[in-house]
Image (tube, rainbow, N blue to C red):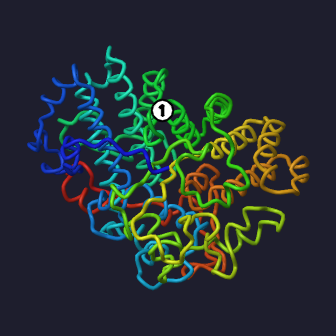
Amino acid sequence: MKNNKLFLSLVTSFLFVTVGCNDEFLETEPTQFITQEQLADASVNNPDLIRGTVSGIYTLMFETGTGGTTGHNDFGQKGIDIWTDMLSGDMALSQNTYNWYRNHVDYQATTDFTRNECYIPWRYYYRIIRSTNIVINALGGNDATPTNAQNRWLLGQAKALRAYSYFYLAQLYSREYNATQEILPIYTDPSQQVQAKSTGAAVYALIVDDLNDAITLMSDFTRSSKTEINQYVAKGLLAYAYGAMGNNDQVFTLTQDIITNGGFTLTTQSQLLGGFNDVNTPSWMWGVDLTTDQGLDLISWWGQMDLYTYSYQWAGDRKSIDRALWDSMPATDVRKGQFTAATGYRPVNKFYDPARVIGGQRVITTDYLYMRVDEFYLLHAEAAAKTGRETQAKAILTQLLTSRNSDIAYISALTGPALQAEIYKQTKIELWGEGKSYLAMKRNRATINRGTNHLFQAGVAVPYNDDKMLFKIPQAELLNNPFITEQN
């Protein structure tokens, strides 16, 4: 599991130019090691240079401080996953000693644009966008199709990463898909200065175009590791984007393709209780093989979530499954055993360092999961149910649950809203702690009602499109971008 190492060159230093909305953020001539023009010139004959740059973008996804702070909750995508799981209500802050998440779960962070919690995702995703724009520009621009196959694959990855960033920004900083509402500034070239907000239609059109381009550009790409995006990861991201837009026919088609042709197998019963710590797990579509070389420790997803890591989970900031969600699982469901009442419903049998020494893992070598195929069985069932294909919806849901629960005969009788509600519930259970429940909450226009083990706001009903459920455009953007004057 630990043999693969990320290929990182000195060029990655070039990517750590901050991204945002003032002159510093939009610096067009970084001076560290290499200029944009030199990168573009060299890429024609030296794809390794671009490959090192793209590798640096993937590194941004798990490095500490990529959201611009020194906070112990600032560590890339998996840090944001914790926030969204808490917002969805499925993850409870059930004990609070160090206060890293108190303001978040008490809705102070999402309603106050001066908080770092609003700034971190904005800076993180725009930082990736800035870096992908540099790569895209070096490879010929937004409309290019490089003749060199390796450059073509790298362009596909860069476009997919840009789309991934815009998708999450659109999810976090807007209530729901609204074609006419202005939501985000769009940057597609590294030389652009500050921009006004574009409409939801324009943002999602860019996401869809980028991902369709990525799928085409990477149609013959065989990746060297699951750290890299391939065409099926791009199709998964596209399915999520279409789901957010309400285009469930497209979701149905894409998820069927992933299930049938992607080459990934469902997570087995033993793997469901196996720690979720190995990127080589056959169901994992996208993740990162973490080694001692990356140097991650307490400031990491594992450092927040795993009892068997030197972590806040061990030391006093407990993240538990929502008690009502746990209670809804029958004893016949193997996934109920991922959490134990004795540990305050923490996920001690879902996510763990294999050594299983409480507080033991100091340098993180357990891997990060970004996407697995099981998500698309559930998303396929959801899209099927929403488009009237209820027979297919029940069949695919049954296929997923057969290895999870010995008592699923009830599924055959479900129809209409009851079927959709069951698929949504199973999505929450299956993907707990993986950063997907917030996306499902928005797609299904759900109202959350936290269970009794939440320290804050327990029993308070909050709809998916409430102000508390989205991040405010941060103060730094409003101060430095004259075209944006409102928090959302």
Quadrant where the C terminus sits is bottom left
* Residue 35 drawn above or below residue 453: above
Q: Nearer the viewer, residue 109 or 128?
A: 128
Foreground of the two, 20 or 29: 29
Q: Find the residue positioned furthest to the top.
A: 147
Q: Residue furthest front?
A: 3
Q: Amino acid at mark 1?
A: Asn
Pointer 1 local density, CA inside 10 Å: few below 14, some 14–19, many at least 20 = many
Q: Which residue is mark 1?
A: 230
Instruction: Classify mark 1: helix, strand or loop.
Output: loop
The residue shown at (73%, 54%) is 269
- Farthest bottom residue in view: 97
Residue at x-position 75% and y-position 49% = 420
- For residue 467, say whether it is visible: no
Query: Number of marks in the image?
Result: 1
The picture quadrant where one finds residue 93 is: bottom right
**What is the x, y in percent for residue 7?**
32, 41
Please provide percent x and percent y for residue 169.
40, 49
Q: Is residue 32 above or below residue 410?
A: above
Indicate the position of residue 320 as horizontal and vertical percent values: 60, 73
Question: Which residue is at 55% across, 43% downward?
Answer: 244
Would you identify the image quadrant in which residue 301 lies? bottom left
Q: Residue at x 48, y 26 (%)?
A: 215
Can the viewer see residue 283 in this picture? yes
Q: Is residue 278 left or right of residue 202?
A: right
Q: In the displayed structure, does residue 446 sit left or right of residue 465? A: right
Q: Give the percent coordinates (x, y) of residue 27.
A: 13, 44
